[in-house]
């Protein structure tokens, strides 16, 4: 493959690798947040709906305790009613699928870039791997957040730039540079 064509292909590989890394980081954080929220929903619902144990504590027999227990029971009831509407389990499933898919793509492209650098070339098999990763990325994009968290996205982008600075990306030298370096 000519150095110019190889450089173009490598630029596409690096771009998709960094986008996959960005999405992996973003959806990893979103997944962790949603799982944490779901856990808190479950804990508060469980606390408020227990008929014994916690409700039998003597603190709840005070005037202040009765108000707190009534508030806790009301919050628990509201959370129990809203949990099916909010559908956190479906969000967790979607975020898990996006996180896993972008993680796989990122790993595949990271290995692909490393192999190309070691071989100083891209084989047909490597290009096929790239095209598969590209198709998977486009398929995953269909489930992307319609309104992403911009602050989180910028934070993840900065982390990816630190991990993969553009100046450290490998590109084949053009023929003149290769002759000088030989």
Image (cartoon, grey):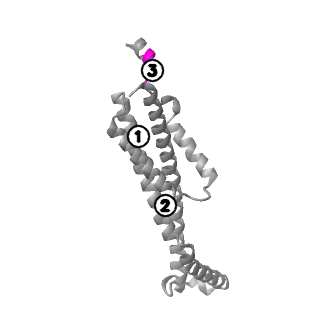
Q: What are the residue bounds of the magenta stretch? A: 172-177
Q: Position of residue 125 (x, y in %)?
A: 32, 40
Q: Position of residue 88 (x, y in %)?
A: 52, 70
Picture quarter with the C terminus: top left
Total marks drawn? 3
Q: Which residue is mark 3?
A: 174
Instruction: Give the vertical position of 66 relative to 123 (above or below).
Output: below
Picture quarter with the N terminus: top left
Nearest the eye: 163 or 166 = 166
Instruction: Give the vertical position of 54 relative to 36 (above or below).
Output: below
The residue depicted at 41 percent of the width and 17 percent of the height is 178
Instruction: Give the vertical position of 99 relative to 5 (above or below).
Output: below
Q: Which residue is mark 2?
A: 95
Q: Which residue is mark 1?
A: 110
Label 2: how many Cα within 10 Å (few below 14, some 14–19, many 20+) = many
Label 1: how many Cα within 10 Å (few below 14, some 14–19, many 20+) = some
Q: Earlier in the sequence, mark 3 or mark 2?
A: 2
Judge whether residue 8 can be spotted in this image: yes
Q: Secondary structure at mark 2?
A: helix
Label 3: how many Cα within 10 Å (few below 14, some 14–19, many 20+) = few
The residue depicted at 50 percent of the width and 60 percent of the height is 31
């Amino acid at each position: 493959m000519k150095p110019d064509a190889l450089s173009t292909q490598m630029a596409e590989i690096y771009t998709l690798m960094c986008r996959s890394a960005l999405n992996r980081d973003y959806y990893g954080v979103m997944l962790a947040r949603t799982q944490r929220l779901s856990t808190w929903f479950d804990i508060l619902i469980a606390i408020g709906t227990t008929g014994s144990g916690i409700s039998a504590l003597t603190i709840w027999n005070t005037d202040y305790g009765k108000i707190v227990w009534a508030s806790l029971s009301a919050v628990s009831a509201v959370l129990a009613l809203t949990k099916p509407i909010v559908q956190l389990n479906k969000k967790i499933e979607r975020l898990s699928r996006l996180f896993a898919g972008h993680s796989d793509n990122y790993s595949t492209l990271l290995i692909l870039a490393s192999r190309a650098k070691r071989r100083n070339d891209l084989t047909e098999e490597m290009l096929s791997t790239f095209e598969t990763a590209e198709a998977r990325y486009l398929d995953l994009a269909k489930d992307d957040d319609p309104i992403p968290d911009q602050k989180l996205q910028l934070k993840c982008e900065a982390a990816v730039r630190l991990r993969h600075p553009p100046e450290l990306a490998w590109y084949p030298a053009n023929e003149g540079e290769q002759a000088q370096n030989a």
